[in-house]
Image (spheres, rainbow, N blue to C red):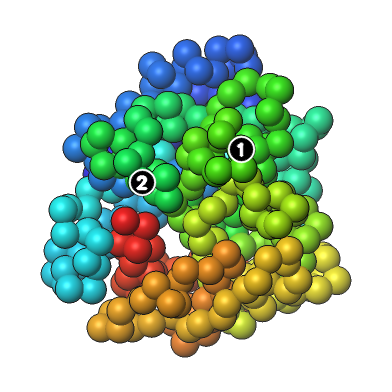
Amino acid sequence: MTPTVVHLDEKGRLRPAGASAPVRPDRLAEYLAREVRIPERASDVYVYVHGWQTPAHTAARSATRLLRRAQELTAARPDLYPGLTAGYRPWCVVVSWPSSSLPGPAGYRRIRDRAHAMSKPGTGQAGHVLGHLLGYLDAHRTDPTDAAVLRNRNGQYLHLLGHSFGGRFLCEAVQWAADTPTGPRVLGWRNPADPRRPFTVDSALVFQMAAPRNSFDTMFPALFPTDERPAAPLQGPLVLTHSRWDRATGFWHLRAEGAPGIGHSGVGTAPVPQYSTRMLTLDQPYTRRLLDHRIVNVDADWRFRGSRVSRLSPAGSHSDFHHPESAHLLASLASLSR
């Protein structure tokens, strides 16, 4: 599996690698149709956005490694993933953005401010571009036979996957697409209360999200369906891991934001109910009871510990999510989306 990589510049504009100018907003659809081709054999489409200090080639390698491991698990233990008996053939679009800085609090603040500026409506275009990317992927689908899932004639499902600051971009993109009913039609969600929105996102998984614990109340309040807003975009679960060994979202986030982040301590307040569980071992199945919630906090303390050397590094275990247990969680979400 070789992922397709799209590049964003410091203003959140889509800029092909080596290009002297970004893609014009009115040419986004044309560019995506030419450069992003979903293989017909793919069963699951992932949009992966990386985090701090991650170049494009590393992000592509990370996504490939994680999804390949998930494929191996589903082939070796089909009994743990009953929804994938028809086959699990993931394909991925990797979104690369300028995430490098010096380590330490100054570097963390720099990337935090850049990520915010890139995705903030009115100043950045990351949400706009990612919204169009999701819309393009969505356009390759027919109406699902079941309104509760997102599937086309090829049986393709859509999943969001992020790490660190990448979770902010994904949340901003989905919220942007939902909040622009008079703008370009990029992505919709099926809901009886709003027939203009025919689809939903199947699942979203963010490893060690670099954002304040109350972000879903303050930054992304429109992501989830509520009694007052039933036609929100995330009808499926949003799953977020956390580990107390994550120094980037613990110590450095505390220094920069005045409080630890989601990747260290989990979600704080949110507009919808939450559920907390622990990361399971490879022989333990994730049941619908564990993952069928609006927000799922997954305590990964026992697994995301980092090496003895990385525990002393500025980021700690912030990037220590490339484990078989992570792929187990990812594949379980795909299975339960069916």
Residue type of the residue flagged with mark 1 = Asp
The image quadrant where one finds the C terminus is bottom left
**Residue drawn at point x = 44 percent, y = 32 percent:** 138
**Residue 312 picture quarter:** bottom right
Residue 244 is left or right of residue 307, and the answer is right
Please rate how many residues cluster around mark 2, counting C-alpha atoms within 10 Å: few if below 14, some from 14 to 19, many from 20.
Answer: few
Q: Is residue 75 above or below residue 56?
A: below
Residue 332 is left or right of residue 119, and the answer is left
Q: Which residue is mark 2?
A: 146
Q: Mark yes or no: residue 187 visible.
A: yes
Residue type of the residue flagged with mark 2 = Asp
Q: Nearer the viewer, residue 19 or 335?
A: 335
Q: Position of residue 321 (x, y in %)?
A: 45, 69
**Residue drawn at point x = 49 percent, y = 45 percent:** 200
Q: Nearer the viewer, residue 175 or 305?
A: 175
**Residue 63: mark:** none
Q: Position of residue 145 (x, y in %)?
A: 32, 41
Q: Mark yes or no: residue 107 visible.
A: no
Contact? badges 1 and 2 (CB < 8 Å)? no
Q: Position of residue 313 (x, y in %)?
A: 60, 74
Q: Which residue is mark 1?
A: 194
